[in-house]
Amino acid sequence: MAYIEVKDLVRVYRMGDVEVRALRGLNMSVREGELISVMGPSGSGKTTLLNILGGLDRSTAGEAKVGDVDVTFLDRRQLVMYRRRVVGHIFQTLNLVPTLSAAENIALPMIVNQVPKRDRQSRIDELLETVQLTDRRKHKPDELSGGEQQRVAIAAALANDPPIILADEPTGELDSETSQVIVDFLVQINKKYNKTTILVTHNPIVAAATERILRIDDGVIKAAYTPAELESGAEGRTVSYVDQMRQRIKKLNAELKDLDEKFRKGAVTGDEYVEERLRLKAAIRGLEDEVHRHGG
Ligand SMILES: Nc1ncnc2c1ncn2[C@@H]1O[C@H](COP(=O)(O)OP(=O)(O)OP(=O)(O)O)[C@@H](O)[C@H]1O
Ligand SMILES: [Mg+2]
C-alpha cells in the first residue's frame, strides 16, 4: 500500500522577476515501511521535495499525501503538529544544538511534544542504545565525531516515534567508511521500527543499500530502479567512468566485509587476513583517489 503518494507536485520560487521551477509536476509513491533513495544532480529539486514532505515548505500545486493527510492542505498550525509527530528529518549539515549534550539533543523534540520526563528518560536510553552511543550521552556535539553527531541526529529524529524518516544527504559530509556506518543504521532502523524512509544521496554506494532508487532530474522523477539495475547501468544511461569506479569501490567494500566475516569465523588465518585486508584497502584508496581526481 502506498504510504506516501505524490501527484503532479509543483514548487515555483519567485525571486523578484525570476521564477525558479524547482518541482515541475513530480509523481512518486512509497510503500509503507519501504526504504528508498532519491538521486539526482544538484538543483534538481531533492531538498525541495523533502522539505514539502517534511512540512517545512509549501508546494505551489499538486498533491502530497502522507498516510491519510495531504500536507498541501495543512494550515500553519496543522503543519507544526505534523512536523512534530509525523516526520523525523535528518539534514546534511549537522543540526544539533551545540550547547546541549547528546542526551539533551535527543530529549529536545520530546520536550517540545510535552512528553513527561520519566518517559523521556527511558526513550533516550533506548535510542542511545539503538545508535550505539550510550557511552557518549554526556558529550556535546563538538566532543563527538561527525559520524557520531549524525547518529545523535538520527536518534533525535526518532525521538517522537514518527512513521516517516526523511534524510537529506545525511552522509554528505562524511568519509566513505563513516557513511557506510550511518547507512547501516538507517537500514537497521527502517527494518526494526518499520519506518518509511526517503534518503537523498549523491553517493551510489549509499543508494545501493536501499530497496529502490528514484532518479530526479529537473524537478520530476525520471526513472526508478533497483540497486542491481543501477549497478549494471540498466537504467539506460551510459555509466560514467566515475560511476564505474564507484561501483568497483562498492564491490571491494563488500569483499572487505566478507573477509572480516571469514576471519571472525576462523576461515582464514591471521596472516592471510592482514595481507588480503591491506590489499583491498589499498585498492579502495586508489580508486577513491581516482574518483576525487575526476571531481567525484
Ligand atoms: N528558497 C528558495 N528560493 C528560491 N529558489 C530556491 C529556493 N530553494 C531552492 N531553490 C531553487 O530550486 C531548485 C532546486 O533546489 P533544491 O535545493 O531542491 O535542489 P537539490 O536537488 O536539493 O540540490 P543539491 O543536490 O545541491 O542539494 C534550485 O534551482 C534552487 O536554486
Ligand atoms: Mg539539497
Image (tube, rainbow, N blue to C red):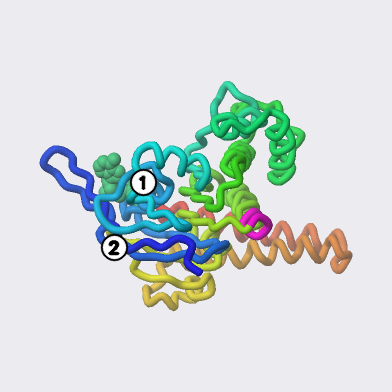
Q: Which amino acid type is shown beneath numbered disc 2?
A: Asp
Who's the residue at 34% across and 65% down the image?
27
1 falls in the magenta region: no
Left or right: 19, with 177 as reference point: left
What residue is drawn where x is 37% and y is 73%?
237
Q: Residue lying furthest left in this view? A: 17
Of residue 108 and residue 96, the one placed in the foreground of this image is 108
Cβ of mark 2 under 8 Å from ligand 1: the answer is no
**Mark 2 crowdedness (10 Å alpha carbons): few <14, some 14-19, many ≥20:** some
Q: Secondary structure at mark 1?
A: loop
Q: Quadrant of residue 126?
A: top right
Please tell me whether residue 296 is drawn above or below residue 93 in the rendered image: below
Q: Residue 219: where, in percent of width, then height?
A: 29, 58
Q: Please tell me which residue is depicted at 69% across the width and 61% down the height of the picture.
A: 279
- Relative image position of residue 5 (x, y in whole percent): 41, 63
31, 13: nearer the viewer: 31
Query: Image quadrant of residue 114?
Result: top right
Q: Quadrant of the C terminus?
A: bottom left
Q: Which residues are magenta?
A: 189-193
Q: Amino acid at mark 1?
A: Leu
What residue sits right under mark 2 in the picture? 8
Q: Residue at x 58, y 56 (%)?
A: 195
Please name whichever residue, 39 or 176, is drawn nearer the observer in this view of the structure.
39
191 is within the stretch colored magenta:
yes
Among numbered discs 2 and 1, the one appearing first in the sequence: 2
What distance separates the C-alpha of mark 2 from that of mark 1?
A: 18 Å
Label 1 environment density (alpha carbons within 10 Å; few <14, some 14–19, many ≥20): some
Answer whether residue 249 is visible to the viewer in this image: no
Residue hosting label 1 = 74
- Name the disc covering residue 290, or none: none
Q: Looking at the magenta stretch, what is its main secondary structure?
A: helix
**Residue 288 percent location from the top left of the image:** 53, 55
